[in-house]
Image (cartoon, rainbow, N blue to C red):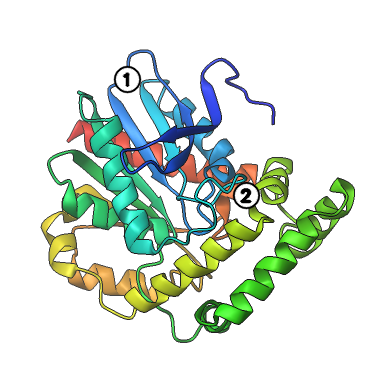
Amino acid sequence: MVSRYPHCIHLNNSRQLTQHFATELLEIKSKEPSLHVLVIPGNPGIAAFYKDFVEALYENLGGQASVTAVGHISHSQKDSEHGRLFSMHEQIDHKVDFIEQELQHSEQSIVLVGHSIGAYIGLEVFKRLQNKIKMFVGLYPFLKLNKNSVTQSAIGYIARSSLLSKGVSLLASFIGSLQPSIIRGIVRRFLGTSWSVTAVDVACCHLLKYHTMRNVLFMAMTEFQKLTEEPDWMFVRAKEDKIAFLFGVDDHWGPLSHLEEISKRAPEVTLSVETEGHTHGYCCNEPGSFWVADYVANFIKTQKRH
């Protein structure tokens, strides 16, 4: 992968946190940052999917903010945790520990940006670390189940079955063992007809692994169990002037009915609808990454002026 910032962006930089979990990072460090933006991925939780977004956000903030995407544990190319499965709750703990360990001496304000289920995780992190977090942005947020989504029902059915989850994971690892040209063709055909070259490469290298797919599905199972509950509206209302959500027009993970509910529960939250035709997986192509990065940067700049 060729970076526009080859001297300062670190891809797949694995670190050990206090619990000894390898953590995949994608980061651009500013020389004199006034902010530190932490990007929490959705599921499959692979930081490298956000390369174009992280670069564009760094650029839109004038190089005055460090930007770090923090991958989920064991959603990566290497099986560092030897097959262990991690729940969404453990992934939340992991992000809290990352901030407390890596940024404990940082003087910069922290901005959380969460995509999809990462938006739910980000709100939970915000709740635990209210004194450290300056603002939060949820992108195409997955905050509660959508009973009208056939896709969610199908994923939930597979994720709840250990047998089916293992079968899907074995199929993914088999595809990942084929010749690179065949793998790329399959990924392009079934996952990413509009994906960037970077996103296709990431899927081939990281997603098509048995341990990654098992963790993707196990985390999905625990997500679906938790998201039968209502979000913590009391917390959202208490922090509504520091929160923004971006929704898509036709996004079953974050339908506009959820936007309407937020507007009633916490009317001062900044709510926006993207109408440019980008998708829930905006980070998998350059136009989506650039547009959403511009949105996030504008929100941050507006908040800083207040």
Which disc number belongs to residue 195? none
Q: Return the residue nearer the eye: 255 or 27.
A: 27
Which disc number belongs to residue 33? 1
The image quadrant that residue 189 belongs to is: bottom right
Is residue 100 shown above or below 151? Answer: above
The residue under label 1 is which amino acid type? Pro
- Image quarter hosting the N terminus: top right
- Image quarter hosting the C terminus: top left
For residue 52, say whether it is visible: yes
Element class at badge 2: helix
Q: Which residue is mark 2?
A: 284
Q: Return the residue nearer the eye: 261 or 190.
A: 190
Q: Position of residue 2 (x, y in %)?
A: 69, 27
Q: Mark 2–mark 1 contact, CB under 8 Å?
A: no
Dot 2 surroundings within 10 Å: few (below 14), some, or many (20 or more)?
A: many
Q: Position of residue 92 (x, y in %)?
A: 32, 55
The residue under label 2 is which amino acid type? Cys
Q: How many numbered callouts?
A: 2
Position of 183 with respect to 34 (left or right) is: right
At 88% across and 50% down in the image, what residue appears?
179
Q: Position of residue 116 (x, y in %)?
A: 44, 60
Distance from Cα at disc 2 to Cα at disc 1: 27 Å
The image quadrant that residue 90 belongs to is: bottom left
Is residue 149 shown above or below 271? Answer: below
At 26% across and 69% down in the image, what residue appears?
262
